[in-house]
Image: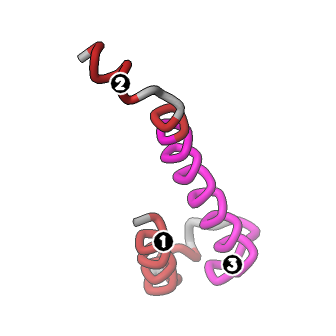
């Protein structure tokens, strides 16, 4: 999901380069280092947001959770 969204965001950034050029200061709209770093930050944040609850759920005992419900 994050990968597809990131690719879509990169495609939209490429399409709107002329619009983005007026909003950016000191960076060109097609600056690959900036685009890659933004995508990396988003992917890391999304991975951590999904990983932390998954690890917490994996560490719980299933029978204890079922009894509490």
The mark that comes first in sequence, 2 or 1, is: 1
The part of the chain drawn in magenta is: 25-54
* Residue at horizontal 51 percent and vertical 78 percent from the top: 10
Q: Residues within 10 Å of mark 1 (few under 14, many from 20)?
A: few
Q: Which mark is residue 3?
A: 1
Q: Nearer the viewer, mark 1 or mark 3?
A: 1
Tell which tag, 2 or 3, sits nearer the viewer.
2
The vertical placement of 51 against 37, above or below, is: above
Q: CA distance from mark 2 to mark 3?
A: 56 Å
Mark 2–mark 1 CB contact (< 8 Å): no
As measured in the structure, the alpha-carbon distance from the residue carrying label 2 to the one carrying label 1 is 35 Å
Outermost front residue: 63
Closer to the camera in the image, 41 or 33: 41
Which residue is found at the position 58% from the left and 76% from the top?
Answer: 21
**Magenta region includes residue 43:** yes
Q: In this rendering, which labeled residue sits more in front, label 2 or label 1?
A: 2
Instruction: Give the image location of residue 31, x and y in percent.
Output: 70, 80
Q: Residue at x 58, y 60 (%)?
A: 43
Q: CA distance from mark 1 to mark 3?
A: 23 Å
Question: On screen, 19 above or below 1?
Answer: below
Q: In the current view of this chain or complex, which residue is farthest to the left? A: 69
Name the residue carrying label 3: 28
| Whole-percent x, y for residue 47 in the image | 56, 53
Colour scheme: secondary structure
Name the residue beneath numbered marker 2. Answer: 63
Residue 41, image x, y percentages: 65, 57
């Amino acid at each position: 999901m994050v990968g597809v969204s990131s690719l879509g965001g990169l495609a939209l950034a490429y399409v709107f380069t002329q619009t983005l050029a007026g909003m950016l200061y000191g960076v060109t709209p097609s600056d690959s280092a900036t685009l890659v770093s933004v995508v990396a930050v988003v992917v890391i944040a999304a991975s951590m947001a999904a990983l932390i609850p998954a690890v917490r759920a994996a560490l719980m005992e299933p029978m204890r959770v079922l009894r509490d419900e």
